[in-house]
Amino acid sequence: MNRIRICLRTAVSRHGYRRAPGRAPFNISAMQLATGSNNYSGKQELHICRFCSNLPEPEYVVDDNTYDRVCSETLDALSDYFDELTENAADITGSDVVYGDGVLSVNLGPVNGMYVINRQKPNKQIWLSSPVSGPKRFDYIVLPGEANGRWVYKHTGVTLHEMLQEEIGQIFREQSVNFLKLP
């Protein structure tokens, strides 16, 4: 049975973590992690620690040209799709989609708020500011054996398109929303 090494950590600040007092890293099976069979009490949380884990760090660094191409394709496709969604939405008032200079702003009216999706070339990331889930930073990751990569939020493993599918699907309930078909 495969086991991964994780640490039980407690938050000490908004961004920092420290190991919980008296807790050493321990092993847990993937099945236990997936089923949640280990219940932990208190304000502690499970955190997969890349520093004490025996899992290899994935190779996902892309060159500048690949980043520019993929980022432009992604933002162009998202811009076109948001334009299509807002044009066909009779129940969303005050919506507006603006794309330029690597920044996509999608105003979905006063009730639903504004999404901002923009490129961050120095970090080779796409940043999302969501009125529902807050700010997220997505890295372009190409897994071994795959031709195309995906924009992944490393803290949760959710992709940009999955997050948009979930959140925007709740807003545009009268339309069929499918962000997963986009490049």
Image (cartoon, rainbow, N blue to C red):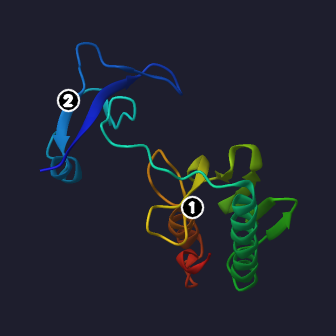
Given this view, does label 1 or label 2 mark the residue nearer the observer?
Answer: 2
Mark toward the start of the polypeptide (1 vs 2): 2
Mark 2 lies on a secondary structure that is strand
Tell me which amino acid carries mark 2. Answer: Phe
Tell me which amino acid carries mark 1. Answer: Leu
Q: Is residue 54 visible in the rendered structure shown here?
A: yes
Give the residue at mark 2: 26
Q: Position of residue 51 (x, y in %)?
A: 39, 30
Mark 1 lies on a secondary structure that is helix
Q: Position of residue 140 (x, y in %)?
A: 59, 57
Specify the quadrant that holds the C terminus: bottom right
Give the residue at mark 1: 160
Locate residue 177 relative to residue 83 in the image: left or right.
left
Label 1 Cα crowd, 10 Å radius (few <14 / some 14-19 / many 20+): many
Q: Position of residue 30 (x, y in %)?
A: 20, 50
In the depicted view, which residue is nearer to us: 65 or 175? 65
Residue lying at 22% horizontally and 47% vertically, measured from the top left: 33
Residue 78's place in the image compared with 18, above or below, is below
